[in-house]
Image (cartoon, rainbow, N blue to C red):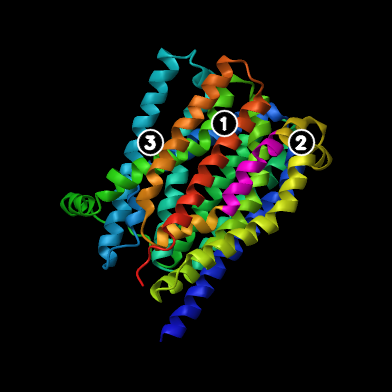
Amino acid sequence: MFDLFKKKFVKDVSTLATGLIIAQGITFLLTPIVARLYLPEHYGSVALFLSVTVIFTQVGSLRYEQAICLPRSDEDSLELVNLSIIILVLFCLIFFLLVVLVRFVLPDISLVASLGIWLYLLPFSILIQGLNNIFSSIGLRNKIFKRLALADISPNLVTPSSRIILGYLFGSSVWGLMTGLFMGFVSKVLVLFIALKKTGLFLILPLNFKKKISLAKEYVDFPTRATPITLLNSLTQNMPVLFLGIFFSHSLVGSYAIADRLVRMPVNLIGESLRRVYLQKCADLNNKGIDLRGSLIKATSTLIILGFIPFTVLFLWSEDIFILILGEKWRMAGSFASALTPLLFCILVAKPSFVIFVVLKKQSYLLFTQFLSFISVPIIFLSCFYMEVIPYKIILIFSLTGSFILMVVMYMSFRISIEQPK
């Protein structure tokens, strides 16, 4: 029975991983074509818009969508679906009113001026992405993994393809990139919605406020604990784009965004695959009372050896590589990629260390480093802008600071890796 469960689990994970690999592979292959059709400043405007969308999407339904998989009864799960949608819609309506207010009262604020008329589309963007998260949670609960994989592939195919067509026909523009972005968002919602309707998994229940309030209280940890942590992480990851947009040109934002995306993509793909496998291995070792430090040293050393040459090449010649693949106008993106190399190398190497904290249930130890990462970004950007440091050096300082914090995380993981019960 256990072997059957294990085989099915591996098959399900493989299905989702295959969809993710195909999706990111499509994006990686089509991005050079898109980059040659659009200007960095136009790409930067969309990157700024997307960063704000990502930040608020993470908290739009107060993370109740993460609880959809947890209830034993399907009825309670559907009540959580409806609760998540109600909260998301209310959040987007309030956000729209705030956008209108800020647009008229404080139109000269840098971020508001940078987003311009596209500011009004933010609530719609948050709504679509929030629905994507909710629908995905329903799919996970009901194990429709093939359809979830297809939903992952859809926006990664639709967005760059539509951008290529619009760029070829009408030239570089923000609206062309934005149209492609929204077409990708909507395509994923439609794929998920159709899949859920066909399988009878999506139902709108009568408004039972008493039941919804009861479930909201039962899963109160999601809005009170998961939401602040998620918001903190999301802000930390997206603040470089926001600060570059506030203090510098959209061209620099676009260069940074495409450099970060292209270099981070293989790191995330390799790192996530390794994390899943290493998590299972460490759990087995821990259950047997075996010291995890030897496994951690071996896994970390292997990643250092595997990553050293490609990251060294990227650090030394990323500018030439980006010019060759994307074109001369993306030279600055190559410089940013070089500056980000130390951070991304440490992100990859630190993957086994984060697994140790999970297996030994020591995630609370990471709160300090998460907070340190969060406050370091505005300190770096504000102080460097005040001292008139050039953008490349700002990103390099940001990268080296993040690398140092990750080294602290790795040191902490080595320290606690022998604390599992014998």
Residue drawn at 27 percent across, 56 percent down: 79
* Residue in the foreground of this view, choosing between 312 and 49: 312
- Circle 3 Cα neighbour tier, 10 Å, few/some/many (<14 / 14–19 / ≥20): many
Specify whether residue 281 is in view: yes
Query: Where is the N terminus found, in terms of image quarters?
Result: bottom left
Q: Image quadrant of residue 204? A: bottom left
> Mark 1 and mark 2: span between their CA atoms?
22 Å
> Mark 3 and mark 1: span between their CA atoms?
23 Å
Circle 3: element type: helix
| Rendering coords of residue 371 (x, y %) | 41, 37
Circle 2: element type: helix
| Rendering coords of residue 210 (x, y %) | 15, 51
Does the magenta run of residues contain 99? Answer: no
Main secondary structure of the magenta stretch: helix
In magenta, the rendered stretch is 336-349
Specify whether residue 144 is in view: no
CB of mark 1 within 8 Å of CB of mark 2?
no
Give the residue type at disc 2.
Leu
Residue at the spot of label 1: 241
* Residue in the foreground of this view, choosing between 300 and 47: 300
Residue at the spot of label 3: 92
- Circle 2 Cα neighbour tier, 10 Å, few/some/many (<14 / 14–19 / ≥20): many
> Mark 3 and mark 2: span between their CA atoms?
33 Å
Give the residue type at disc 1.
Val
Residue at the spot of label 2: 37
Q: Nearer the viewer, mark 3 or mark 1?
A: 1
Residue drawn at 18 percent across, 54 percent down: 211
Which residue reaches farthest bottom?
1
Q: Which of marks 3 and 1 is nearer the N terminus?
A: 3
| Rendering coords of residue 168 (x, y %) | 77, 38
Give the residue type at disc 3.
Cys
